[in-house]
Amino acid sequence: HYSFYLRDGMTVLELGAAENSYLPPDLKLNKHVGVGAVQSQMDSNPSITSSMIVDLNNVIDDEGVDSQEFAALCDEGFDAVIMANTIDFLNHPREVFKSSWRALKPGGIMIVPFLAKDAYVDKFEEAFTKQWRDMSDDQHMWVCGSFFQFSAGEGWEGLKGFDISPFDARKEEDGNVLSKLQGGDSDKPCGAFVVQAQKKSMAEGVDDADSVEEFIKSRLWMMPSLEDRDKKLVAPRLARAYDALDSQDQDRMVQHFDSLPKIYASLIKMDQFAFTFSMQAQLAADLLGDPDFVGNDLQVNNMKMGLGLRKPSAEFWAPVGKLTAAMAPEDKVNLLSYIVPRFGSGDASQDETLEAFVSGLKPTFAVIRSKCPAMDESDVQLLGSELLASEVLKPGRSTREEFAGWLGALNE
């Protein structure tokens, strides 16, 4: 299998390296870096050109292997990552696969071979993860494929699984009680399997309208805290927000994509029935699409207060929540996405507009009720809050007095 996918001159990173890499004897690699647990074993491997000891079970959750030396190594960009007979001992495989994705050049391949679980059960059964012990070899293939999917999602392509067992390999049923009573042949070779995928090339820019969503999706491949479901929901919404901006604000929006994990780290605590995944995606996209949103701590904290995840501030969020209680959840999300970016600017005039907004809600609603007595209360609050947000929340647009005069001149 290695003979088909590995070529002379390639650079290869081997995870779980030991004394034998099982490479074709005539393969001439340009570089073969071994990452393993025992230095003496790697030193006796004739194929390895350099090596380092790294504990692959020491990870940063949702990020990757916790080793600065290993992270620097991954930045070099390898043609291939191989990891033979190692996946069965990994406590945090997703993070290892994330690091492997980073280590590959675009188009590079990760090859994960493993033997049937009974191959060395007598020596290493206690070291196997519980998941590996409890599953069949067919399930191991499926689970290994899922590690690719849940590490970088669409950042992998060409995901394939192979049964490369010898023709006369013993099957799992050969080891059951009945076969042993019948004298099953334990001398047969064990089964062998491979799961592999290639690193997809990341879109470098936007060539036309059709490429916007693909460009954004590629920026989400390795985004922590976002489930695959969230990425699929938020990507088209981000694309629409991106299209609505000028080129300068588009660049700014991309620079602030790293705020998404902070947003979703808060949203995951919301009631998924009252605040659906689609609404979460829309809020995230609307926030990133606002030129004033930078994802600083003050903005994130105010988002939490607006969502009821923190005690609301007495001077702003408590009255806003009380006065807009009749609005539909979707309308509250839209309002929240407009208000939150106004915090944290350090601009005194912006702070004044926030105060003008909250103090203007009650009289604005009163005017609308008097002019439109048949209007539903939810619509009164929606109309009033949107008028205030569009005219008062942006410094220099309308003063409180100008807005009041304009509102008073309106008729049904």
Image (spheres, helix red, strand yellow):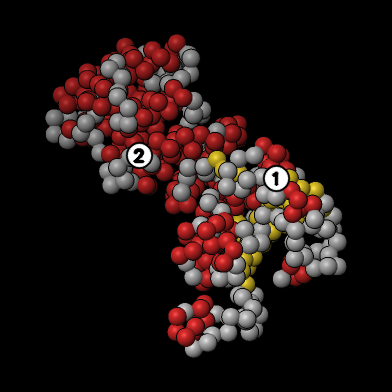
Left or right: residue 161 versus residue 388 is right
Tell me which amino acid carries mark 2. Lys
Residue at 45%, 11% (x, y): give it: 348
Q: Which mark is residue 53?
A: 1
* Residue position for label 2: 269
Residue at 56%, 54% (x, y): give it: 90
Estimate the x, y position of residue 411 in percent, counting from the top left. Answer: 22, 26
Estimate the x, y position of residue 356 in percent, counting from the top left. Answer: 33, 15
Q: Which mark is residue 404?
A: none
Q: Secondary structure at mark 1?
A: strand
- Reply above or below: 261 against 368: below
- Image quadrant containing the N terminus: bottom right
**Between marks 1 and 2, how big is the CA–CA gap?**
38 Å
Q: Is residue 365 something that shows in the picture?
A: yes
User: Mark 2 or mark 1, which is nearer the start of the sequence?
Assistant: 1
Instruction: Place residue 80 in its image quadrant.
Output: bottom right
- Reply above or below: 191 against 267: below
| C-beta proximity under 8 Å, tags 1 and 2 | no
Q: Nearer the viewer, residue 275 or 261?
A: 261
Instruction: Place residue 29 in its image quadrant.
Output: bottom right
- Reply above or below: 25 against 214: below
Front position among marks 1 and 2: 1
